[in-house]
Image (cartoon, rainbow, N blue to C red):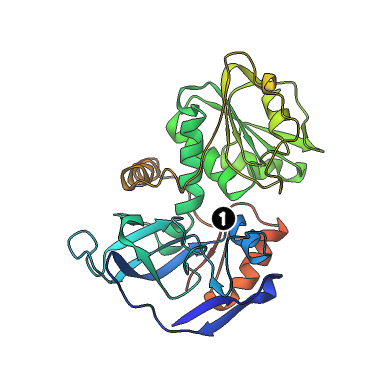
Amino acid sequence: MKAVVVEKAGGPEVLQLKEVPTPQVKPGWSLVRVKGFGINHSEIYTRKGESPDVKFPRILGIECVGEIADTTDPERLPVGQKVASIMGGMGRDFDGSYAEYTLLPNNQIYPVTTKLSWADFAAIPETFFTAYGSLRNARAQDAKTLLIRAATSGVGVAAIKLAKAMNPGIRVSGSTRNPKKFDLLREAGCDDPIEDRDNQLQTDEKFQAIVELVGPKTVVDSLSHMTQGGFCCVTGGLGDAWTIPNFDPFAIPTGGSLTNFGSGVMNSEKSFNDMLKLIDDNHLDVSPTKTFDLAHTADAEAYSESGAGFGKVVVLP
């Protein structure tokens, strides 16, 4: 099979298309024919060598959509079944989805029913599921106001759309460092775009729910914009920072909650299919911003890393 292999850490050029043996099934694992996968920042970090637990050579890719090609669980995962998979060590502990086929543990393969195209379906798993879980942890379904920090990211755009579906009356604000993207945010459903200037929101408004995608670099500022009794869910690390030096817990407003979300923890077939139903029932536009083929996966990562896009970048083997 063809696969994109990383032999050593570096720039996008280290993503090399090669012929490698197609994996063979083993007890508890099934083979997925990869029909599409999204590009994620965690894969870019890993490619740069910033994931010390990942050993090279490695086929990256923490998510995929596709069909069962060979199975060890014919009742739940029959050959031809449409599936999705997220995290669980794929692309890190074992080879992932940057390939024509990937071998995955049965318990992290989710059988699904959807009429979405492969391109649209491939834009969903990690991005929309992360947004869905983050919104739930931030209690956005019960809030009147929501702030999405880094709203122009793939997860940010997904969160805007899902929030409106989960809670039609909610008012959504979204931050970006680039005011030129305000109109794009409004087109995605954001009510109030806000400039993020030097990690400070240019507003005095406060919010009942906050989805923090920049991470530790802006958490304290986000908390200063949270109402008493509000919820802030830290999900992303787009700011390339992982700790908050000298964090003062009293920065959390009275009665407020600071929590987090990780899609690898919430992996649940039911939750994933609940999210798919929400997307289908509300006819949400989940189309990727740009698509590439497997031979141009390096270009896909470079484009995603550049920040030039708006939304999800997808590769279709």
Compared with residue 26, is residue 87 higher up or lower down, i.e. above or below? above
Q: Residue at x 26, y 64 (%)?
A: 81
The mark total stands at 1
Q: Position of residue 232 (x, y in %)?
A: 58, 28
Q: Position of residue 152 (x, y in %)?
A: 65, 45
Q: Which residue is mark 1?
A: 312
Towards the viewer: 286 or 250: 250
Q: Secondary structure at mark 1?
A: loop
Q: Residue at x 22, y 66 (%)?
A: 78
Q: Residue at x 43, y 55 (%)?
A: 88
Q: Give the side of residue 72 with respect to residue 159, left or right.
A: left
Residue 276 visible here? yes
Q: Which image quadrant is residue 208 in?
A: top right
Towards the viewer: 291 or 306: 306
Kind of residue indicated by mark 1: Lys
Task: Name the outermost residue toward the right.
Answer: 198
Q: Which image quadrant is residue 39 in?
A: bottom right
Quarter placement of the N terminus = bottom left
Residue 124 visible here? no
Task: Name the outermost residue toward the bottom.
Answer: 19
Q: Position of residue 256 (x, y in %)?
A: 58, 19
